[in-house]
Image (cartoon, helix red, strand yellow):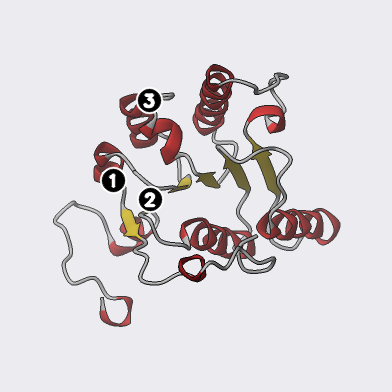
Amino acid sequence: MPKGVPETVPDDGLTTRQRRQLPVLAVHTGPGKGKSTAAFGMAMRAWNAGMNIAVFQFVKSAKWKVGEENTMLALGDLHAQTGAGGPVQWHKMGQGWSWIRKNDDTEADHAESARAGWAEIARRMAAQEHDFYVLDEFTYPLHWGWIDTDEVVQTLRERPGRQHVIITGRYAPEALMDAADLVTEMTKIKHPMDAGRKGQKGIEW
């Protein structure tokens, strides 16, 4: 796509402007580093465009803190104080889901929390509560069979309005990638951990 110009234009009856305004479903998958990082970079662009942003982190503990969370919430505070950008919400699976109260001690509890998280996301999409969703590490509960992939794909295909959705994680199901508008596979060529170096603050979190 030289200079951002599509190589082909489909005969879909839409104008260039209408096609440009279509909602995007993106999937960042693969074994390499950068899936979530790229998603949060897109979220920052969405914030700058004034979009209402909601991040839902699956798998990660509610106790874990990552730099992107603090940054995005600070941007949300800036919006509340000055009107710049857009509002931001950040939710984590398990005790971080504000709509349930449950201790996640077993795999069954984790699976139930993941399903509760997806049910809330589906509800919000139906109500068009947000403009931009990041479903971080959402591919894992799909891969493990905690959440039905066909149901997710149908909900995403039928979501109303102009709601952008970015999904991250390894092992993205084929059906999800087929439904997506944008799929990027991160391939690891080299990583500091290969040399026995642990993750660093500011690099990994």
Amino acid type of disc 1? Answer: Met
Left or right: residue 185 compared with residue 92:
left
> Label for residue 27?
2
The image quadrant where one finds the C terminus is bottom right
Report the residue at 53% width, 27% height from top: 114
Q: Secondary structure at mark 1?
A: helix
- Secondary structure beneath dot 2 equals strand
In three-dimensional space, the C-alpha distance between marks 3 and 2, rounded to whole angstroms, equals 18 Å
- Which residue is more in the foreground, 63 or 133? 63
Residue 160 visible in the displayed image = no
Residue pointed to by mark 1: 177
Circle number at residue 48: none
Task: First in sequence, mark 2 or 1: give its number.
Answer: 2
Mark 1, mark 3: which one is toward the viewer? 3
Asked whether 78 or 68 is in front, the reply is: 68
User: Residues at badges 1 and 3 in contact (C-beta under 8 Å)?
Assistant: no
Q: How many numbered markers are drawn? A: 3
In this figure, which residue is indicated by the disc labeled 3?
145
Residue 91 falls in which quadrant of the image? top right
User: With respect to residue 104, does 129 lie above or below?
Assistant: below
Quarter of the N terminus within the rendering: bottom left
Closer to the chain start, of discs 3 and 2, is: 2
Look at the image and tell me whether residue 97 can be seen.
Answer: yes
Query: What amino acid type should be assigned to the residue bearing mark 3?
Result: Gly
